[in-house]
Amino acid sequence: MYVELVGNQMLASIGELVEWESVVCHLIALIILTVGLYLLLFKPVKRMIKERQDKIKNIEKENSDLNAEVKKMKDSTAVVLSEAKKEAAVIHENAVKAANQKADDILAEAKNQAKNLIDRTEKELDEERRGLQTDIERQITDVSMAVAEKILERDISPEDDKKMIAECLAQWSKEQ
Amino acid sequence: MTNKNNITANVILARTPDAETEAMIEKFVQERGCGKVKYEIDKSIIGGVIIYIGDTVFDGSVRSRLDKIKSDVTA
């Protein structure tokens, strides 16, 4: 009861102090001020903030795109570099193979030439040896024949000669 | 037609033949149709006899035997 009494008294005091028209006017003024502030200040600022956010998003997107492109270029560079290394390795390997093949060919050619030279030399030596052998045999034969002729000329007696002639005639007669 | 009795047999010997040898040779050549024999002495044949009757040659000389031996050795 006491509180309700005090409250009523305070309301009565406030009602005496505050004019309701003034409060309404203040409220209207506050609303107008709020709407004005909203329209003139808050909305442009909000729009500006949104634009900035969009701009930042665009920049971030561009940055992201650039980063992706850079990453893609890095990957591409790595691939190209890897392929170049592989190609260089293949070229090096082929060059080594070609050099080895060339060396083998040169060595084989040299061996072949050496073998041909040895074969030719051996053949020439063999021919010369055979020629010398034939010449020696011919000389020995000539000497032997000459000696045999001399011995036969000396040793064939008229009787031997007669017997030889008779044998020849008998043989030819049989053959006829 | 050729008459064989007109063909002369050329006989080469190393030495002069005796009568018996001549008889053997003449008998041989007559059997082959030769009526005449011409003898020739050539010491280079060493021994034996070579008889030419027309194109036929009977070579029984020591020289030809030596040449054959030489040919066989050097072949």
Image: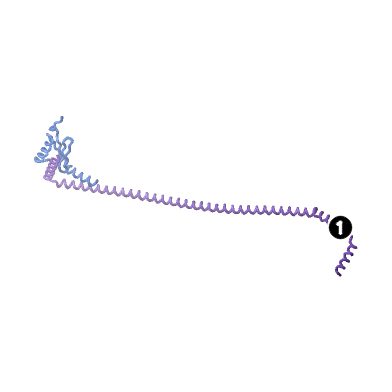
Rendered location of residue A33, percent (x, y)? 83, 55
Rendered location of residue A4, percent (x, y)? 86, 67
Which color is chain B depicted in? blue
Q: Examine the image and state in which quarter residue B6 appears.
A: top left
Residue at 66% of width from left, 54% of height from top? A64
Q: Quadrant of the N terminus of chain A?
A: bottom right
Given residues A167 and B67, the one toward you in this image is A167
Which color is chain A depicted in? purple
Does residue A26 appear left or right of residue B48 in this picture?
A: right
- Crowding near pointer 1: few (<14 within 10 Å), some, many (20+)? few
Q: Amino acid at mark 1?
A: Val
Given residues A97 and A52, the one toward you in this image is A52
**Chain that bears disc 1:** A
Q: Is residue B13 visible?
A: no
Rendered location of residue B45, percent (x, y)? 17, 42
Residue at 17% of width from left, 35% of height from top? B54
Given residues A24 and A47, the one toward you in this image is A24
Residue behind mark 1: A24
Q: Is residue A8 visible?
A: yes
Q: Examine the image and state in which quarter residue A30 appears.
A: bottom right
Q: Examine the image and state in which quarter residue B66 appears.
A: top left
Q: Quadrant of the C terminus of chain A?
A: top left
